Amino acid sequence: MSKVIPCGFQSLLERQFQNEYTHAKFQEIQMEFRGKMNCVVDKVFVEGHACRYDVVEEAIHNGKPYHKIYIVGFNRANMNINCSCLLFEFWGIVCRHLLLLFAQEKVTKAPNKYILSRWSKYMCRKHAYIRASYGSKVKEPHIERYDGLCKRFYEIAEYACESENTTELLHQHLNAYDCTKTCKETSSRKN
Ligand SMILES: [Zn+2]
């Protein structure tokens, strides 16, 4: 928490990940930022809010260069993104092709849905709770309370995410009870 891995690029996006993610995850994201330099936009298709970018990535295999095309989709209205490499779907990491699209579309802040809380450096307390519950048949009272809250949060999130209005409403309610601010403030004081 007290150490900060420096950013490699003059990029607000990279700084956003630096501020949010653990060191290990931020280093993985930095690999994607570096990999972005091997990618170029080949074609762009736009229809209404929907865009499709064909991104060509140059790589070297067995000493020989080769090119691979990735299809990247972006909706300018709801900021949904997807890439045919599926790195985000499988590993929760925003890939180099999406980072290139963000740069082309002048997106300087990744939407919250692509900043996963599971990689957040502010989640240390929650992980401690999860680990503490392994191998223990009798739950300690605070872990039991934690599990009960998680179960309710998941149920409510599943319902709320069905619409943008209910999602926004839930965010507003949660902001009023945001205990994680204390954790973040403590961490930033250490930094
Ligand atoms: Zn990709």
Image (spheres, helix red, strand yellow):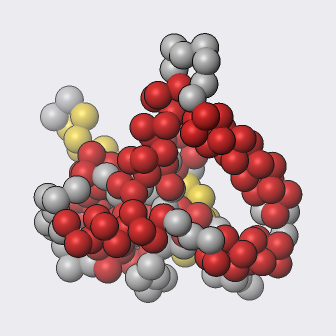
Give the mark count: 0
Camera-side residue of 5 and 94: 5
Query: Viewed as shown, does residue 35 lie left or right of 108?
Result: left
Report x, y in % for residue 135: 51, 14
Residue at 46% from the left image edge and 29% from the top image edge: 131
- Residue 63: quadrant of the picture: top left
* As drawn, 159 above or below 52: above
Residue at 42% from the left image edge and 47% from the top image edge: 125
Query: Viewed as shown, does residue 152 lie left or right of 95?
Result: right
* As drawn, 83 above or below 180: above
Report x, y in % for residue 162: 85, 63
Does residue 85 show up? Answer: no
Residue at 82% from the left image edge and 78% from the top image edge: 165
Report the quarter where the C terminus lies: bottom left
Does residue 20 show up? Answer: yes
Residue at 34% from the left image edge and 72% from the top image edge: 185
Camera-side residue of 188 and 162: 188
* As drawn, 151 above or below 48: above
